[in-house]
Amino acid sequence: MAASEHIVGRGIGNKLILFSVILVAIMWMLPIAWTLLLSFKPNSELMISTASAFHPPYTIKNYTDIFQSSGVFRWLWNSAVVSIGVTVGILVLSSLAGYGFARAEFKGRDIIFVLVLLGLAVPEQAVIIARHQMFSDLKMHNTYPAIILPGLSSAFGVFLMTQYFKAIPKDIDEAAMLDNASRFKIFWKVLLPLTIPAQATLGIFSFLGAWNDYLWPLISATKPEMFTITVGMASTQTNFAQSEGLGFLMAQAIFAGLPVFIVYLFFQKYIVRAVAGAAIN
Amino acid sequence: MQVSSIELDSVSKRFGSVEVISELSLTIHSGEFIAFLGPSGCGKSTLLRMIAGLESVDGGEIRIGGERVDRLPPGARGVAMVFQHYALYPHMTVFDNLAFGLRNIGTAEDEIARRIEEAARILEISHLLKRKPGQLSGGQRQRVAIGRALVKDPKAYLFDEPLSNLDAALRVRTRVELARLHQQTRATTIFVTHDQVEAMTLASRIVVMNARKVEQVGTPMEIYGRPATEFVARFVGSPAMNFLPVQVNDRGGLASAVLGDGSIIDTHVPVAALPGGDLRVGVRAEAIRVRPDGALPGKVEVVERLGDRTHLHIRLMDGSTLVAEDTGISQVQPGDAVRLAVEGATAHLFDAGGLAYHARQ
Ligand SMILES: Nc1ncnc2c1ncn2[C@@H]1O[C@H](COP(=O)(O)OP(=O)(O)OP(=O)(O)O)[C@@H](O)[C@H]1O
Ligand SMILES: [Mg+2]
């Protein structure tokens, strides 16, 4: 709101910026629009040329075909369970850990915090074999906990929440102490509500990350009824999907992205703020 | 209303190896408005926070209303604190900010509403109760912070530099309101400040602190008129007291101070009390006037006009400097040679250790 006034209000320099922003946005949108367009074309026409995308016939058969593959609702459900589980878990754990790092005094706190931060630098691929072995030993593959648990260790989340709690003046805790609030009450009623913007940011990124996650669910879930939507969709693609079923492929992509799109619609305000905040800080 | 005395019995505090408060004892009477005055870093806030329970006590005892409290958590001590940066709960309305502490001790909602209504009326914030702190001006936040203390009907109010974030005009207004509030409530109040004017105008007694210890405890006029040490004399009063090295002669039992240039200030300090060794005379600017028949010659270097009075920075014949006071309409110009008359009755003598010797009362 303030930002748009800013852009509209100023002279030619800002018009130029606005113009280039729109240009970049269009470049971002084009592939999505292309995907959407192709998803409504019969596969047979696309086999000959994708240029046919610009004229009829159009069809929704690709979408109805998605529902022919029996697992799709189950996969959506799995993805929802996993994503919500991961999101809630990350929020709870990161908040508690962040409060601890920011407010509690204990031996080795700074060292442990550095260890947590090191977690940011370890790529998933580096540990995935050991992790797979571990869940095999625990006989947990093809369960929700197996897919969810590794996602809960969010170094980013702990870091973000720690910084956020640290930014809240200690005066506030102290005022609450003098107001007879217990430690838990201070955390729950006074500090946690102040972290809602950070919770929203972290929640959205966690949800999107978990929804789009492919590698770990692919490895851990081997039974089709435990597939997430990303893994399930990939499993329905034949070897010649690119040439023989391009429209279907595109419809799948749109379909799998739909929940993310809906999340975005609901939380747009927070996402914009989160990204802007990340850029400014 | 429940007003209590506060007693500090040789309390100490250290942060790591640094001792910030050392064996400090002090009794604050019930209903008294007391100011902790001292330079930055002298431990005022630390001492206040020890009383509030926000800082642990490493040695000694703190008693509030006769009850030992230094092992009790902050909430159990029955005191309320107003923080320098207000420390309001940003996500709660003003009403909920005031109600939070009362709800935590299970006060009935109608009683809470009644108390908040009354506090809001006194502080003139009734129309702000539905707002959040972010929608208030600094002065309004300050009132809410005071209100949060007021509704608790505490045994004592603790203020940590509550006015330092307000602009000059608002600071003066709030100061007067705090004085009025104290006259109404007669509640025991400790007020931390490094502003001598705040301390002088508000407090019934001032505790002047310097590096870990109390320099002097006294009424504002005692602190100003009979400073116990050189530190107090320099810290309180603006401009700071003038100090000049002197030799002392006995003049009928009273000390007659001879300055470097031979001129004489007849003090009323009894000679008998004075120690040997180096002495300095301490005189406030208002006791040094420009007079044609003055005994002390000097040259004016800087003229500071304050409107109602003028401060003259003067170099004496022996090279030492002092500040004298003249009327607001002073005609004196920089470079002028002047003669100064020093009112000896209000002069003090200080020994090498900074200890003060005063005229008999
Ligand atoms: N938590 C702490 N850890 C270590 N040292 C501290 C801590 N709190 C205060 N100090 C030190 O104790 C001394 C007294 O601090 P305090 O805050 O009481 O000073 P103050 O008189 O209130 O000063 P100001 O007028 O600047 O507020 C200072 O030297 C400060 O550096
Ligand atoms: Mg302080």
Image (cartoon, grey):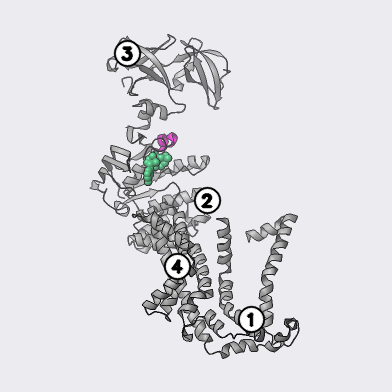
On the image, the x and y values in percent for residue B288 come to 46, 18
Q: Pick the residue in front: B147 or A165.
A: A165
Q: Chain under label 1? A: A
Mark 4 lies within 8 Å of ligand 1 (Cβ measured): no
Label 1, secondary structure: give it. Answer: helix
Q: In which quadrant will I find the N terminus of chain A? A: bottom right
Region of the chain picked out in magenta, as a range: B193-205
Instruction: Please state which of residues B4 and B56 is positioned toward the viewer in this rendering.
Output: B56
In the rendered structure, find residue B254 and report the number of the disc placed on it: 3
- In the picture, the disc for residue A250 is 1
Between the residue at mark 3 and the residue at mark 2, the CA separation in whole angstroms equals 57 Å
Residue B49 appearing in the image? yes
SS at badge 3: strand
* Mark 1 vs mark 2, CA separation in Å: 55 Å
Label 1: few (<14), some (14–19) or many (≥20) C-alpha neighbours in 10 Å: many
Circle 3 packing at 10 Å, graded few (<14), some (14-19), many (20+), is: some
Are the residues under marks 1 and 4 on the same chain?
yes
Subunit of mark 4? A
Ligand 1 closer than 8 Å to label 1 CB: no
Quadrant assignment for ligand 1: top left
Q: Which residue is mark 4?
A: A91
In this figure, which residue is indicated by the disc labeled 2?
B137
| Residue type at numbered disc 1 | Met
Residue at the spot 35% in from the left edge and 40% down from the top edge: B33
Circle 4: residue type: Leu
The answer to which quarter of the image holds residue B215 is: top left
Quarter of the image with the C terminus of chain A in it: bottom right
Mark 3 or 1, closer to the camera: 1
Question: Which chain letter goes with mark 2?
Answer: B
Label 2 near ligand 2 (CB < 8 Å): no
C-alpha distance separating marks 3 and 4: 78 Å
